Image (spheres, rainbow, N blue to C red):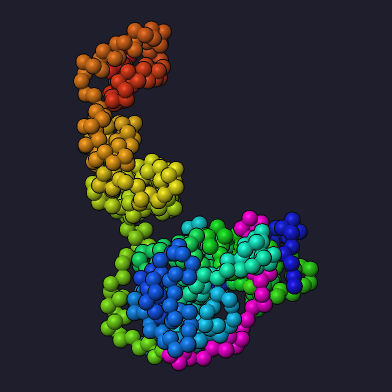
């Protein structure tokens, strides 16, 4: 068996690209967010005690018969429609036969030559260029259980002292989304998975949490020699399949490593073995798994315990009409309506606040203010607390009210942060927190004037510089007044009053 080459021995990524063209196809497994499993009534909640969400059907016990979950079929059709696929009017399930300890039946109910959805596409944008990735098929299947290898250093079977199996996940409905070999770079591979995740999240058919395994990506990578000018494209090379990549970063890094690794082997006159590989996140490289099976190795045959699916045209059309706004259309709308840039939307989405910002704008905030407070303040607080922004005890309506008060001069930014403290602490609405904590901006000219005069008297040297025309020297006096007012003054008003009192306005 081949071993992973040290990263230092590999050609650089740029050097590999100079001689070879990557050809990349992606297979993405998505756990559907149904209440029950694909073929039985067992619950699908994540994190339950091992082997507590099982029954004779998902354990494959003799005499137990599967029944198709209608919600899973509906969710799969929605995904296919959103990916511009043709929806089969007739399809059926098949048995995919192979032995794994976490496969209780020793076969997986899947779809083979008659999938539910075919011939679609998804556009992704990288550095301003749109790449169309063809979708070969979207088919339905059931998930396997989960093996836990104990006693080793890597969490894999090699070196483990023993293994445990949790069958809670066995039977959870999956869709597998298979692309054409249209991807040509790690960056496009990452962007495709990211866009697919956002699309499925918009459909509300899965939580697509890669860290929990509800979205997993397998990357098929091969290389072919770049042709000389005038030569036709070379045939595709032998591919490897890097399994179960569980983050966007891992997708990009694993593909990048495989390109360099394969280039090094080809440069040395070695052949690429068709095999599965595993990505080591810490080491940043892939290692061999097992020789890759062909379809014939799985001995597919039609599932005898399930009737074929024959979906009425009306059923599919109703789902098509009911699709929500999809990510690409939403981005175009937000750019047009709110003036956001593509970078703004990327930042908001990465911070997990895009929905919250849109709801805050709908509640009365300006797009700029909503973006500012969710992205710069509340997303940071959520990260510090180890939670999601949507879990914070403050609503978009609360944030909108705060932005209105700041815009009207009734709160400064500093006071607004104290109001947020109060709302998060459960002290009520923004207005209730302001009243309870006495946080409103002081508009009493007499109080401000007294504080201004005291600041001037305390720092005569600075005051003299300002009188002499050095207006920018007024900063320390503004700070002194704000401190005396305990932040409950508008800094711009304080500055104007100071300059007026010093005859420098």
The reply to whether residue 19 is in sight is no
- Residue 83 in the image, given as x and y percentages of width and height: 41, 73
Query: Horizontally, is 438 left or right of 107 in the view?
Result: left
**Position of residue 308 in the picture relative to residue 399 (left or right):** right
> Residue 372 placed where, x, y %?
36, 42
Q: Nearer the viewer, residue 131 or 456?
A: 456
Q: Residue 469 vs residue 132: left or right?
A: left
Residue at 26%, 13% (x, y): give it: 450
Which residue is rendered at x = 39% and y = 91% of the image?
307
Give the number of callouts: 0
Question: Looking at the picture, does residue 7 appear above or below residue 371?
Answer: below
Q: Residue at x 51, y 91 (%)?
A: 301
Quadrant in which the C terminus appears = top left
Q: Is residue 129 above or below residue 488?
A: below
Q: Is residue 295 magenta?
A: yes
Query: Could you say where residue 131 lies in the image, as x and y percent from the top left?
Result: 49, 66
User: From which residue to which does the magenta span run?
Assistant: 277-305
> Residue at 52% of width from left, 82% of height from top?
105
Q: Quadrant of residue 428?
A: top left
Quadrant location of the N terminus in the rendered image = bottom right
Which residue is outermost to the right?
268
Whether residue 25 is visible: yes
Residue 302 % position (x, y): 48, 91
Q: Is residue 68 magenta?
A: no
Residue 126 in the figure: left or right of residue 399: right
Give the image quarter of residue 175.
bottom left
In this view, the residue in front, 428 or 43, is 43
């Amino acid at each position: 068996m081949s071993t992973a080459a040290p990263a230092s021995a590999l050609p650089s990524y740029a050097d590999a690209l100079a001689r070879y063209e990557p050809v990349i196809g992606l297979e993405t497994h998505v756990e559907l967010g149904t209440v029950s499993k694909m073929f039985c009534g067992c619950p699908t909640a994540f994190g339950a005690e091992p082997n507590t969400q099982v029954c004779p059907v998902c354990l494959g016990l003799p005499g137990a018969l599967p029944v198709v979950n209608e919600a899973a079929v509906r969710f799969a059709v929605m995904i296919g429609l959103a990916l511009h696929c043709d929806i089969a009017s007739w399809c059926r399930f098949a048995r995919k036969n192979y032995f794994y300890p976490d496969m209780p039946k020793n076969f997986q109910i899947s779809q083979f030559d008659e999938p539910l959805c075919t011939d679609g596409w998804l556009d992704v944008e990288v550095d301003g260029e749109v790449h169309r990735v063809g979708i070969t098929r979207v088919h339905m299947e059931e998930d396997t259980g989960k093996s836990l290898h104990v006693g080793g250093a890597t969490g894999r079977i090699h070196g483990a002292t023993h293994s445990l199996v949790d069958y809670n996940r066995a039977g959870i409905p999956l869709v597998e989304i298979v692309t054409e070999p249209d991807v040509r770079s790690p960056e496009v591979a990452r962007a495709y998975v990211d866009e697919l995740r956002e699309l499925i999240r918009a459909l509300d058919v899965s939580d697509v949490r890669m860290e929990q395994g509800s979205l997993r990506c397998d990357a098929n990578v091969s290389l072919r020699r770049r042709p000389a000018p005038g030569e036709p494209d070379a045939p595709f090379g032998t591919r490897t399949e890097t399994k179960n990549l569980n983050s966007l970063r891992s997708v990009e890094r694993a593909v990048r490593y495989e390109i360099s690794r394969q280039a090094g082997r080809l440069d040395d006159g070695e052949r690429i073995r068709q095999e599965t590989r595993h990505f080591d996140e810490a080491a940043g490289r892939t290692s061999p798994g097992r020789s890759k099976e062909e379809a014939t190795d799985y001995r597919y045959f039609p599932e005898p315990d399930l009737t074929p699916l024959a979906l009425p045209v009306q059923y599919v059309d109703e789902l098509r009409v009911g699709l929500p706004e999809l990510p690409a259309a939403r981005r175009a709308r937000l750019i047009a309506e709110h003036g956001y840039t593509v970078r703004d939307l990327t930042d908001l989405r990465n911070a997990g606040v895009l929905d919250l910002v849109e709801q805050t704008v709908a509640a009365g905030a300006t797009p700029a203010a909503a973006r500012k407070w969710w992205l710069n303040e509340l997303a940071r607080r959520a990260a510090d607390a180890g939670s999601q922004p949507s879990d914070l005890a403050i609503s978009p309506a609360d944030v909108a009210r705060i932005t209105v008060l700041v815009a009207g001069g009734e709160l400064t930014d500093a006071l607004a942060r104290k109001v947020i403290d109060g709302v998060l602490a459960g002290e009520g609405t923004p207005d209730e927190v302001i009243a309870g904590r006495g946080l409103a901006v002081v508009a009493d000219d007499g109080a401000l004037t007294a504080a201004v005069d005291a600041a001037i008297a305390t720092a005569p040297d600075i005051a003299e510089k300002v009188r002499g025309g050095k207006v920018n020297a007024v900063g320390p006096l503004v700070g002194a007044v704000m401190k005396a007012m305990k932040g409950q003054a508008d800094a711009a008003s304080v500055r104007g009053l100071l300059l007026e009192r010093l005859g420098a306005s």
